[in-house]
Image (cartoon, rainbow, N blue to C red):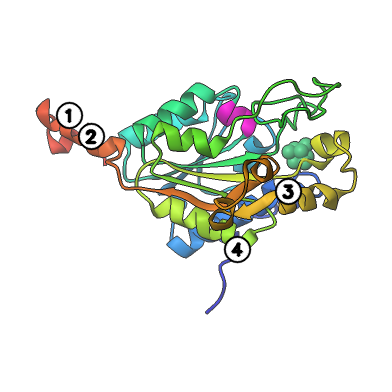
Amino acid sequence: MAHATGEAYLKPGVLPHMWCPGCGIGTMMGAMLRAFEDLGFSNTDTVVVTGIGCTGKLDDYLLTNALHTTHGRALAHATGIKAFQPRLNVVVVMGDGDSVTIGGNHFIHAARRNIDLTAIVLNNLNFGMTGGQASGTTPDSSLTSTTAYGNPERAFDICALAQAAGANYVARTTPNHGWEMQELISQGLQHRGFSLIEVVSPCPPHYGRRNEMRETSAMLHWIRDRAVPVERFEALTAAQRHDSFPVGVLTRRDEPDFNARYDLVRARAGYRQEDVAT
Ligand code: SF4
């Protein structure tokens, strides 16, 4: 059987893409498009929603429906699409700036609503496009263009945030785990409710360069060495966990999603089926 390539979702002639050597966004886009192909997603029934930043350029390359939104607001727009057109596959691709820094409140509430979206967050630990400023996921003590003597803040754990707020499916991976990434995205796309897949990713020209990882490969290796399969992570001591993060499926549950609850409310309000968007 031929392996999926995802090429059918790419605009002809758009490659090479604009992302830096060593960046994980291209790897993530490839995994996402192969997952689309394996699941038989059509361009017309799929909407990819993006915000601002390096990750936000992704929709430029796609033939699917796409919506390029304002910074931090991708999830708000995607929520509107899914609430009104529940039959669509709605996929939101964001960076750590869009998802949990500028857009942190939308992230919490999308997970709380458990709306049936798949959010893929490329966490490169800083604002890459605008020059490597600290974001809500920059590790403490790290050097960035706005924390030249070390970041005094603690970092958000994006997966823990989604878990606590009520997401049905939460997973984490890295560009070192390309096939697993495709599988986790595929699972998230099929799981009803809010699905989050975090991809911890290198940003060699900014985060890497300022934190003694000048070689393109150095940050990939730094991430690889910190990624611990979730089954093994549970057995680590608190000190060992400080420099590690779990990868794999962290949460899988089947709480009713927003659209199921919304259908009940509409029925109570006497909404006729023919009035409901399909
Ligand atoms: S600046 Fe960083 S996040 Fe942006 S494309 Fe380059 S490596 Fe990727």
The circle on residue 265 is 1
**Mark-to-mark CA distance, 2 and 1:** 7 Å
Is the C-beta of the residue carrying label 1 under 8 Å from the nearest atom of ligand 1? no
- Residue type highlighted by circle 2: Arg
**Mark-to-mark CA distance, 4 and 2:** 34 Å
* Quadrant of the image where one finds ligand 1: top right
SS state under label 2 = helix
Camera-nearest label, 1 or 3: 3
Residue shown at 76%/52% (left/top)?
16
- Residue type highlighted by circle 3: Ile
Q: Are marks 2 and 1 in contact (CB under 8 Å)?
A: yes
Q: Position of residue 123 (x, y in %)?
A: 65, 39
According to the image, label 3 marks what residue? 223
Mark 4 / mark 1, whichever is N-terminal: 4
Quarter of the rendering containing residue 124: top right
Mark 4 / mark 3, whichever is N-terminal: 4
- Residue type highlighted by circle 4: Trp
